[in-house]
Each structure stands twice: as C-alpha cells, then as structure tokens.
Image (cartoon, coloured by chain):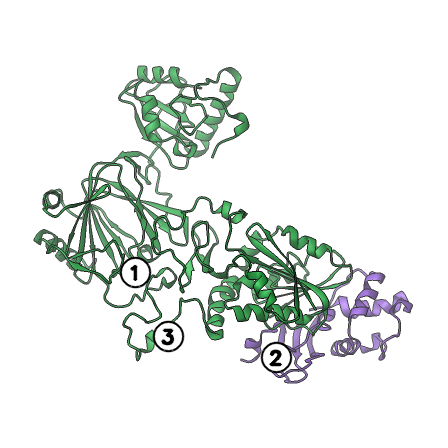
Chain colours: A purple, B green
Amino acid sequence: MKLFVHNFMSSRFLKNVTVGYPLELTVKQFVEKDIEFDRENMIVMLDKIQYEALLVAAAAVNQSDRIPAEKPPKWDELSDDQLKQFHHLLMNIDVVDGELICPETKTVFPIKDGIPNMLKVDAEK
Amino acid sequence: MYFNEDKLKAIGTRFEGGKLAKKVHKSIEQLKRHDPDVQVSSEPTKFLLVSNSSILCGVSLEELEAIFLPLDEQAEFVVYPNKRSYSFVQCSSVEAAIKVRTELHGLIPMALKGSHQPFIISYVNELPEAKKCENYRPADLGIIEDYISADYEKQLVHMLINHPSVQSLKHRAVVHFGHVFDYSTNSASEWKEAEPIPQIIEDLIDRLLSDKYITERPDQITANVYEPGHGIPSHYDTHSAFDDPIVSVSLLSDVVMEFKDGANSARIAPVLLKARSLCLIRGESRYRWKHGIVNRKYDVDPRTNRVVPRQTRVSLTLRKIRRKPCECKWKEFCDWDRKGSISISPNDYVSKLIVGEMSVPSSEDLALKLESSYVSDVYENIASHFDETRHSSWKAVKKFIDDIPRGSVLYDIGCGNGKYLIPKDGLFKIGCDMCQGLCEIALKKDCHVARCDALSLPFRDGSADAAISIAVLHHIATFERRKKMIEEMLRVVKRGSKICVTVWSMDQSQSEYSKMRGNKDDVGAIDSSSQTTNRLKVHDGKDFEQQDVLVPWTIDKQGETFLRYYHVFKDKEAEDLINNVDGCELISVEKEQGNYIIIARKI
C-alpha cells in the first residue's frame, strides 16, 4: 500500500464513527521503489491530499524530516527537490506489513502483503 | 460450422484440377492429425475416407445413405465420428469403391441439404482402430453390462409387449406398475395406484437388493417401448419425486443416452447402454445431470465412433417414490421446496437450518449468507481463471473514464483483476475488491488496491472526483443493499461528481455471452416448471428465466463448476434504483451487449 492511498482512506463506514480520519498507521515493514517523478503530476496530487494525514504517514515510516511540519502555502512554488521529498513519501514507499487503526473505535485493520484488509467482518472477529 | 458464404458453391458443382488437389491434400492432413493409424492407399481398396461428410458439416447419416447406396447398395458407414469433418465408408468390393469414388470425388452432391462442401474421397488401407473412450461420464453413474440373461430378457419383453394396459404415448408405448407417474404434475404429490408389480419384475428387484445396488424396494416401475428413431427429451427425474438411485434396464437394442450437465448443457456425455445392461443413475449423475435419448435411427458408439443402427428397444425403469424431503447436496439443482412448506416438522433443527436456503433472500441476513457463498467464496476460487478471461473494456465505460479530467481521483469499486486500474491515463486510481485473490492479482500489476465490502467503502467522504463499479451491483442480493451500495459510492465522491455503474441485463439477446452460449438448450422447451419463482435457479439456457439466478462458471471442460449469484436487471429497474437514492441524479442508462451502463451524479 502506497502512502498516498492512506491519505484517502477512512473508517467512516464503521458504525458510530463520524469522521474516521486520518487512520492511525503502524508500519512493520515497508519497501522503497523508485517511481518516475513528474512535477506537474505531483502538484496535482498534492492538491488532493490532506496534509494532517500525510504527517501521520510520514511519522509511521520515521521520515517526518523529509517534509515541513506545516502545509506549504503554494505547491507550485516548491522546488523540484522539495517536491521530490513528497513524491518519495507518497509514491515510492510501499507498506508491506502493518496496521490501519480507526482513530475513534480503535478497530484494527491489518495490512498484509501490501493489501489493507478493510473488511468489517474480519476486523470484528 | 465450416461455412464461408463467399466461397459458397452451388450443389451439383464438381471441383477439379489444382483446387481439388489442394482439398485432397487438406483432407489427408486432417486424417494424419486425428487418425494417424489409418494409411492412405495409392491403390484402390474397399475402404474410403470421405471428407466433408459428417454431422459436423451438417451432413446427416440419412443423406449419406441416399447418396451412396444407389452406387453400392451394401456400402456401410462404419465410422461416423461426432467430432471430425470426415467419415469412413466400407464398400462391398474394390470395384464398387472405384465406382463410388469416380462418381462422387470432388462433387457437391445434389442431395445435400445443409452442406455446400464437396466430398473428397481417398482410398485407405483400413478403418481406424477403436479408440479408448475420450468421453467423460457423469460422476456416480453406474453401468453394469450383461446384467440380465438373454432368456430373462425374452420373458420380460414378452410380458411387457403383451401387457393389456400398454398405452401409447407420442412415439412411445408405456406401461406402469406399482404407481402411475402423473405427467401433468411431474411430482410426487399425485400418485395413483397402478397394475401390481409382476412376479418377473419382483424377481429382478430381489436380485438388485441382494447385489446391493438398491436398499429399498422400488414401488414405481415404468416400461417404455421405443421404436427406432424415437427417444426421450433431456430431463431430470425430479429430486422431489424419487429417491436415489434411478435404476434402468435396457432390452433388445443398444442405445446411446446423453447426459447433460445441469450447469452447462453444452457439456454432454454420451453413454452407451447396451442391451441387457443395468444403468444406475445415482448421486451426481442423478441430481445434477439431465439425461435423454436423441431421436434418430442410429447411434454413434462413443467408445469406437462406429455407427450402430437402433432396433426396437424396451427400457424398464425402477424407482422408489420419495416420501421425505430431498436432502441431496446438489441443492442448487433441487426442485424440493426447502422452505419447509412440505410437512417438515417445525421442531426439527435440521429443517430450520435449510429453511429459505435456496430462496431469493428477503432479509439482510439471508442476503449476506447468499452473497458470501455464491459471490465472495466463488471469486476466491476462480480468481486466477477470472483474470485470464477479463481484458476487454466496455465502450461506454471507456468513454466515461476518458471524459474524466487528468489528475482526478477515481475509485474502482469491485476492481477485479484491475483491468480499469492499469491504463496510465493521468488519473489517480484506487481500486477495491472483496476478493483477496483478485486484490493480489491487481496488486501484482502495480494497481493500488484495498480489500473491502462495496457497501462499506474505506474512503473518506467526498474524496474522489469519480467512481466506477463494473459488474458488481448485480451480485448484491436485495434492493435495500443495492441502494446502499449506490449511496456508499456517492458518499465517497465530491458533490457534482459522476459515478458509472454497470450491471447485467435480463435481456441478453444482443450480447456476446448469448452468442457464446448459442449451443445450449433453449429454456422452456422441456422444463415445464420454468416460471419465475421465489427460488434461485441455476441458469443454463440462453435467456434468463428469472432475475435471481445462479450462473455457472466452469474453469475448463472437465473442471469444476462454480455457481455465482446474480440479480439481473429488468428494463427501467436501473432508473428506479437511482431515483430511490437521495441526492442522486440519473444522467443516463445505456444498453451495451446485455449490460446496463448507468451514469449518475451526486447533487
């Protein structure tokens, strides 16, 4: 699971959960792959993401130092090198083994072999 | 069929020269490939290989006889393979063979009705060796050859043919003992006492019991007299009517009985029933397979491919009337009303478990159970085969995706093998599927996937610019749940965003699927109970009989069949569903090859 996917996920579907975002993330194992960097693409993606969740993801892989603690005011004013840090976090890092946890109910959803299992029935077992 | 309209030649035309030589070459190549033991002879012999002369080319044995017998009245079509385009003729002498070949080689005979292909004739040294049975038999079927003696056969036939109460059915004569099978209901509910079972049949029953082929005395015996050319349509002996097994004894003539898989009537197993043999139709062969005898005057022995003419045949069928509910494990093929309306004790724990099991679900709980057994579990089993067969995209879906601006976020709900996730079209795509196997396949293709339920999407509200769901909604078993799935898709997209949802249509007349299934039985011709019921039915024909069905997925010809639950959509049903969802505006419903492509907007 790429970290950018984490940015879109939520446990809102669970009973009595009002926001369910961002999901807490624990990472037991991850791999890094070099995905081609495309400046325009990256800027479009950063427009779509929620910064608070990205900070959660960065912390989960101990790479918080790659990005600023505050959301930059304008993405297109960033240099390629700065954008590449975001690209690395969002696109290159692939979580193989870990957990996603609902911030409200603490329901645990396992990530196994790169696939998060968000099935309610499995989580409630 | 070997048929090309452009190359169509009028019947009566004769091929010569280079064109004929080419066809001879092709004919011999085919022989080498399929029957390598047969050698072509440069000298005349009395055995002829005749190409373009089989049932595969639309040429019947009767047509062949009409063409060949005037030239050699003792010519015999000894080998007439079902799966080849040629057959073999044995002439009475070498001279007769020369005459036949001179007359017919290269000719499209005038007598042909369906075919426009010339006969291509070569001399061969011998006929093909009898081949080992390539055909499969339905599981559990028992055939015991020479079960009764010629003497017993004679006595039995004498008794039956002279029996005072032989009644004539269309093309068949029939007599019942013990009880009369009521053809108007095809069920066990209305049994009438019939002639007492004669001692000679009681003796046979004693033997069957002592040989342990049966455990209880049959109480419904039917004898049929078949004239050559007559058969019986493909049918099940209804589960609810009779116990297991159905016992049948063949008298006087060999015949080929065809067994058809109830989940796939194109899967046919021809089985030779020799005169004086015993046939035990039990277990899977009884509960899942249909059986019948084709109307024709000859059979092709499935073991040798040799033509066997039929004689008058008498069959004796021994059955035990079922008096308790059918509990066979082929419940999808069972006609028994497992909802318990037929005298099942309400205190019986087992019967409670099976109540409503095979009915169209009426509650959330039952829907979940059904989807779990007949959707989720099935996809886990067929995932890799499913992946091999899913590549093409629907035009309307492709257009929907092409119209989404670059850089948008797209969710694919029920992404399967990821076929819509792969293309690099500048979209940020995330797929999800309930099936672990399919998630793994999509992940290997570098797709972004999560495993989830389509009714509980793991995405934040309003986070995508569009969503698609291809061929998923029809696996959801109740209206409320289908509505919930649309609501859930709307929840995760932004206001103003569009969703595209496709489902199977009940009307499959325009579909590739229908063409693919063109060789299957038409539904309804035989099965009188084919009306819309509250029970799930195994779909087999070309057209859907009812909206809630179990559709077979066969991995290969020999392989296992899995049944997937579908709710196929009627005309206007998609519109009705969308109109029932708050905050949803219908944009269009298009029909493409047996699918409805629904496009709607979140308002």
Q: Amino acid at mark 3?
A: Leu
How far apart are labels 3 and 2 at the CA level?
30 Å
Q: Residues within 10 Å of mark 2 (few under 14, many from 20)?
A: some
- The image quadrant of residue B150 is top left
From this view, report whether residue B236 is shown above or below residue B305: below
Task: State which tag comes first along the sequence, 1 or 3.
Answer: 1
Q: Which residue is rendered at x = 48% and y = 70% of the image? A: B367
Determine whether, in the image, residue A123 is placed left or right of residue A58: left
Q: Residues within 10 Å of mark 3 (few under 14, many from 20)?
A: few
Q: Which residue is rendered at x = 34% and y = 15% of the image? A: B99
Instruction: Read off the chain for label 2.
Output: A
The residue that disc 1 covers is B239
The residue that disc 3 covers is B353
Q: Position of residue B138 (x, y in %)?
A: 34, 52
- The image quadrant of residue B443 is bottom right
- The secondary structure type at the circle numbered 3 is helix
Residue B453 in sight in this render: no
- For residue A14, the mark is 2
Residue A14 in sight in this render: yes
Q: Position of residue B425 (x, y in %)?
A: 74, 56
How far apart are labels 2 and 1 at the CA level?
44 Å
Q: Which residue is rendered at x = 30% and y = 21% of the image? A: B69
Q: Quadrant of the C terminus of chain B?
A: bottom right
State whether discs 3 and 2 lie on one chain: no
State whether discs 1 and 3 lie on one chain: yes
Instruction: Read off the chain for label 1.
Output: B
